[in-house]
Amino acid sequence: ERLTPHLAQAWLKIAAVRQKAAQASLSAMAFVKVLKTAAYFKRFQVQKRRRREGKTDYYARKKMTRQDKNKFNNRKYRFVVRFSNKRCITQVVYATLRGDIVVAAAASNELTAFGIPVGH
């Protein structure tokens, strides 16, 4: 199709308006500092898996499992209770560098073996 003089003039007006709008937005825009540069991402360290999943608060765990200095090389036992939809599980646990060691465990569904028909 041929570009008529009327159509060409309309296109020029639209282009001029767009150019003015672009210049106005550039002058109105404040200086934005780039905070996360390539150097930031080079040094970025991914958190532990259980921290990323939101399952373990390592600060609280460290406080809970820390043993007194005068009780060196002794185990610090803790009683863990977990509730599922059907039963309650209890454990006696102590922490090591390799991981937590479960000393004893009991669940509420074992109560029937002791003659208690309810509570599980």
Image (cartoon, rainbow, N blue to C red):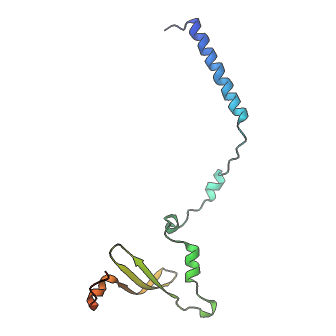
Residue at the spot 63% in from the left edge and 24% down from the top edge: 18
Which residue does the image show at 58% across and 84% down from the upper left?
66
How far from the left and from the top, in percent, is residue 84?
A: 37, 74
Given the current orientation, which residue lies at the most extreme front position?
118
Query: As drawn, is 72 to the left or to the right of 53?
Result: right
Residue 94, position in %: x, y?
A: 49, 85
Q: Which of the two residues, 102 or 83, is positioned nearer the viewer here?
A: 83
Residue at horizontal 68 percent and vertical 24 percent from the top: 20
- Residue 5 lies in quadrant: top right
Q: In the picture shown, does residue 7 fall above or below 85?
A: above
Q: At 66% from the left edge and 19% from the top edge, which residue is drawn?
A: 16
Marks counted in the figure total: 0
Percent of width and height locating residue 73? 56, 91
Look at the picture and state if 48 lies above or below 78: above
Q: Is residue 88 left or right of residue 100?
A: left
Could you say where residue 102 lies in the image, as x and y percent from the top left?
42, 85
Which image quarter holds the C terminus?
bottom left
Residue 97 as seen in the image, left or right of residue 39 = left
Residue situated in front as seen by the camera: 3 or 46: 3
